[in-house]
Image (cartoon, rainbow, N blue to C red):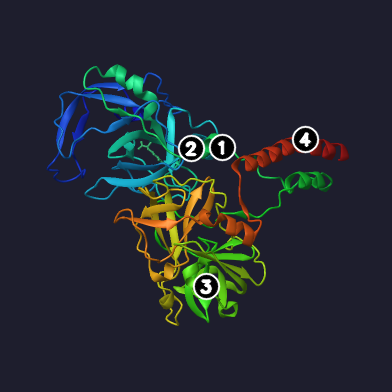
Amino acid sequence: MSAAHCFSSDTTSRWQVSLGRQNLQGNNSNEVSTTVARIILHPNYDSVTNNNDIALLRLSSPVNFTDYIRPVCLAASDSVFSNGTDSWVTGWGAVKEGVSLPFPETLQEVELSVLGNSQCDCLNGVGTVTDNMICAGVLAGGKDSCQGDSGGPMVNQQGSVWVQSGIVSFGFGCARPNLPGVYSRVSICQSWINSHISSDKPGFVQFTSSGLDADSSYTCPGPPPSTTTSSTTRPSTTQILTSPARAVCGNAPMNSRALGDSGVVPGGTWPWMVSLHKNGVYTCGGTLIAERFVLTSAQCVSTSNPDVSEWSVFFGQHLVDGSEEFEMSLGVVNITVSNMTDSNIALLQLTKPVSFKDHIQPVCMDVSASRTFPVGSRCWVAGWENGSKSFSTDKAGSGLRDLETQVASCGDLSDSENICTYTMDLQQGDQGSPLLCKSDSSWFQVAVVTMSGSKSVRADVQVFAKTSRFGSLLKETVGDMPSPEVAATGNAAGFSISLFLYFVVPVTSVFLLSGS
Ligand code: ARG
């Protein structure tokens, strides 16, 4: 299977297919080559729009399967690849726009997330992405397929099998921010593929994605609000648009963490991270959850009667030449500790409210336990692994770093009480730090890192107590909390802005014309 755009006609004579190959140059001991008996292009392939960019090549003779040559499964027609589905693309194409793969041209791989069709269409230009396509990429840019990768596969793992969901087709430039790559959607072609293969048909597998697909409710953002509307029209706009003045949580405007990113993070990446100092010494990580409250692990404040005057909270981490710098610090007026049997949290009330900016933001708390973070979701722990080192006078301190992980099954333990992830290399300094996972487009703190003697499910899995266990304590102590941006509300607001502008602009111009 390949892309139709790779073939200018169905003439087979000059084509050869190599299998089991790793490098395009030099020896490949596992390689087998064969000629092509027939090239079948999709009858509805459109070279202008790239719609139905798929081709089948019938090999002149059957190939023997080996450890290096095996067929991939194909996504069956009822497959679902929701937003965020983890995908891999492989190929020998360019490694950057205009930069071809260097000698000996070893096969490359990249990990991407599926992006919903509506969002992908908005980003690439309305009308470019049809239902016969599927998109993948990272919005921050930096990872993509590129020229020469065409015809190659995008695959997704389900259990132990790899299922091909896409064929590299097109994209604007390569790896540019907000321009995800576009792939032919294999699942749409199940019956067309089967109609051309009579015996030894491919293995079609129904791929399923858990979780809500954020894309189903996605509509393109309207045009940006105009700054030229006349002042007389302003009051009515403000009235419509500013009514829900509630603070938003889980927004990280400067975060460009992508799949596979782990390590020292640039300042502003995790804007709710705070560091907690007891008598001037770094003790724990914590998170800003409301304008007056910080969440950490109960183990950080240990004593039953903590002395608030010993504590200070640092906000707005910056990283300057490997040394730490914080925008500001505040004192603590009250410390509340939960009293559950195993894991516990502590809530620190600040001396005054913090004002939110791009690099100081609250994280969302799932107080009503209404969110699910399905197995396979990508999550991060951010923390100061070695507090004593990074906060000493030794300026080579390691700074805030993060660790990426994936939600794992909790086995027999309750999924509503616990969240389990693949093991991360957590250090003492990570105590009180958050486990952060995205739901819709907001970041939620699903758990607090606690170093207590942990329960275990399997050697490679870590168990955390879900913060939603403390929902009632959070509600009582903190009160009204910032809420996540609701996709539907956001769209409705965007929709009214655009309607409003379409209406106002002509009226304004009539006014200007008659006035001149
Ligand atoms: N059309 C290209 C090819 O022939 C593939 C481009 C993919 N581009 C992208 N940005 N994903 O190889």
Per the image, the residue denoted by label 2 is 116
Disc 1 and disc 3 in contact, CB within 8 angstroms: no
Per the image, the residue denoted by label 1 is 218
Check disc 1 and report its element: helix, strand or loop.
loop
Tell us which disc is closer to us: 3 or 2.
3
Dot placed on the residue nearer the N-terminal end, 2 or 4: 2
Name the outermost residue toward the right. Answer: 515
Look at 28% across and 18% down and name the residue there.
196
Disc 1 and disc 2 in contact, CB within 8 angstroms: yes
Looking at the rendered structure, the kind of residue marked 4 is: Pro
Per the image, the residue denoted by label 4 is 506
Are there few (<14), some (14-19), or many (20+) residues within 10 Å of tag 2?
A: many
Disc 2 and disc 4 in contact, CB within 8 angstroms: no
Q: Position of residue 327 (x, y in %)?
A: 58, 71
Q: Which mark is residue 276?
A: 3
Q: Position of residue 465 (x, y in %)?
A: 45, 57
Dot placed on the residue nearer the N-terminal end, 1 or 4: 1
Q: Position of residue 54 (x, y in %)?
A: 35, 27
Q: How far apart, in angstroms, are the residues tagged by discs 1 and 2? A: 9 Å
Tell us which disc is closer to us: 4 or 3.
3
Task: From the viewer's perspective, tell me whether residue 330 is left or right of residue 91.
Answer: right
Specify the quadrant that holds the N terminus: top left
